[in-house]
Amino acid sequence: MPIAKTPAITGYAAAWSIVFVWSFWLIVSRVAGNSGLTVYDLAAMRYGLASIVALPLCIYYKPWRGMRLTQIAVLSFILGPVYILLVFSGFLYAPAAHGGIFMNGVLPLISILFGVILFGLRPGLRQLSGAALILISAIVLTWDGSATSGKDAWVGDLFFVIGAMFFSTYMILSERWQLGSMQIIFCGTIVNAVIYLPIWALFLPSGLADAPMGPLLLQAVYQGFVPNLIGLLFIAHASRAIGNANTSSILAAVPGGGALLGALILGEALSVTGIVALVVLTIGLLISVRRRLPPPV
């Protein structure tokens, strides 16, 4: 019995650890615009710095063995510059709280839609009820954000939702293909570094040379090592151990953490309508949790 329970315990621990890590990542990404760095610089940090750690490991473990070329191409694209540049651009228009709401909060809803469309899975009444509350809350928060955070906040929200679609696809494939940690790091970091860094260095605008040292180090540590190393490893383990639906639901606790930190650190306050919608969103997330039956004795 203890052996059978261990993977689930570590899976829940990994998922909840990411909740705390990502709540701070929302704040760090939101303040990146004040550092003089461009979104292209942040993407370069994400792939370039992480690859310094990942490259020796990939050379040693050779994670490309056992992977089809199509798997490498698909996973690298999903975790690639299109996804991360959309996310970073979202923070230029919308507050940090919206990043948590529209990237993490809608994950269960997107997972349900993709499950129906791609695999013909039929969600239960509980999942549908939770998804309905999530959808209503997201609509209200979009409207409220345009009123309290500026008329262009919806643009950032849209970028965040598209980013959530990319990430939900990654989680589904991670579970379906049973990908190893080094395989994910290889595709998400090394392949994208090889493709993106030359393009960034030769053609894309950069504020790296003029950025103050303090903000530069903060962004380097968080963007370079947290998402592509810690984040991907923990998410992959959680998805395999407790399933995509449970992982999505736990990660959807990030909106509350992001909103709280945004208010405490950045002074980003939600209106009364926004707070009510965030509460309803949280209820929807709790309802949508799919519990697995315990393993047979």
Image (cartoon, grey):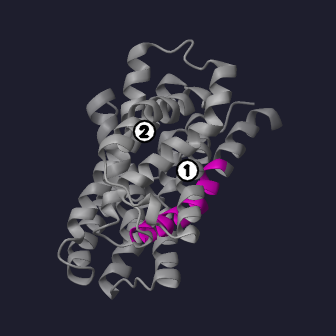
Viewer can see residue 127: no
Image quadrant in which you'd find residue 93: bottom left
- Using a 10 Å C-alpha cutoff, classify the residue at mark 1 as few (fewer than 14 neighbours), some (14 to 19) or many (20 or more): many
SS at mark 1 in the image:
helix
Which quarter of the figure has residue 7? top right
Three-letter code for the amino acid on which mark 1 is drawn: Gly
Disc 2 residue type (three-letter):
Leu
> Residue 154 location, x and y as percent?
21, 67
Mark 2 secondary-structure assignment: helix
Drawn side of residue 295 relative to residue 119, left or right = right
Q: Is residue 278 visible?
A: yes
Image-based side of 266 in relation to 63, left or right: left
Q: Which residue is drawn at the image coordinates 62% and 47% (left, top)? A: 230
Kindly identify which numbered label has been placed on residue 83.
none
Image x and y of residue 245, in percent: 47, 44
Q: Which residue is mark 2?
A: 197
Q: Is residue 56 above or below residue 51?
A: above
For the point 69% across and 30% down, the residue is: 296
Any mark on residue 224, and which? 1
Range of the magenta residues? 14-33
User: Which numbered disc flags the more N-terminal residue, 2 or 1?
Assistant: 2
User: In which quadrant of the rendered image does the N terminus lie?
Assistant: top right
Label 2 CA crowd tier, 10 Å (few <14, some 14–19, many 20+): some
Q: Nearer the viewer, residue 20 or 128?
A: 20
Left or right relative to 24: residue 42: left
Q: Nearer the viewer, residue 96 or 35?
A: 35
Q: Position of residue 4 (x, y in %)?
A: 75, 33
Total label count?
A: 2
Extreme left residue here? 151
Residue 5 in percent (x, y) is at 74, 39
Q: Marks 2 and 1, how far apart in space?
A: 13 Å
Q: Is residue 227 magenta?
A: no
